[in-house]
Image (tube, rainbow, N blue to C red):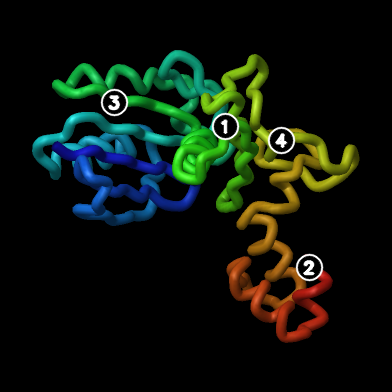
Amino acid sequence: MNFLGIDVGGTKVAWTLIDGKVHIRDCGKVLVPKSRSELIATLREITNSYEDIAAACIALPGVMSKGKLIKAPNLKFMEGFALKTLEREYSFPIYFENDANTFAYGEAKLRGFRDLIGITLGSGVGGGVIIGGEIYHGSGGAGELGHVTFRFDGERCSCGKKGCAEAYLSRQFFLRRSREVFGLSKEPEELFSLAKEGDERAIAIF
């Protein structure tokens, strides 16, 4: 009996297969496809690669409701797609959830917390809220911390608004700012290392 977890981000698709004793059986990652049909084909290919699956969970960035991705600034081509239709192809349940929610829920379960706020930093900025040991699914995109206004007349965010936290904390921000400052794109990890070494240009970006 195995369980499959697939994490779809703005940059990559990563997955892990675990057994009933939570031992990792397999894992992998690929670059995220650029169209809806390609991504769905990738999800099918990953899922069909394994046998004896008891359940699967597919986590995606954005606001979801009843198995449909409503708004996903970093995965716009998937907006409006009824993800639950994929479940009909398989004999086991497939759960669909916001990626930051799954992160927060996993941390709460493994660390024994009943109330927790989890923040994810990657292609975008996500947030998950755990109350009483359960994911909080409030109206209006509860937990979407990346689109909380950080500066009212600030940088333009991928969602279309100005000044969102994501506009200042996401991978794309650091790639763009490093191009402006260094003349070439640098990953956030590299910028962080430079800042720790005292590089004033990297420190200024942070």
Give the number of the mark in front: 4 or 1. 1
Q: Nearer the viewer, residue 51 or 80?
A: 51
| Residue closest to the far left | 51
Structural crowding at the residue carrying mark 2, measured as other residues with C-alpha within 10 Å and reported as few (<14), some (14–19) or many (≥20): some
Identify residue for label 2: 205
**Between discs 4 and 3, the one toward the N terminus:** 3
Identify residue for label 1: 114
Image coordinates for residue 29, horizontal then vertical, percent: 32, 55
Image coordinates for residue 90, horizontal then vertical, percent: 16, 23
The amino acid type, in three-letter code, at marker 2 is: Ile
- Asked if disc 3 and disc 2 are in contact, CB closer than 8 Å, the reply is no
Q: Image check: 13 left or right of 76?
A: left
User: Can residue 61 be spotted in the picture?
Assistant: no
The image quadrant where one finds the C terminus is bottom right
Please tell me whether mark 2 sits on a helix, a strand or a loop: helix
Identify residue for label 3: 94
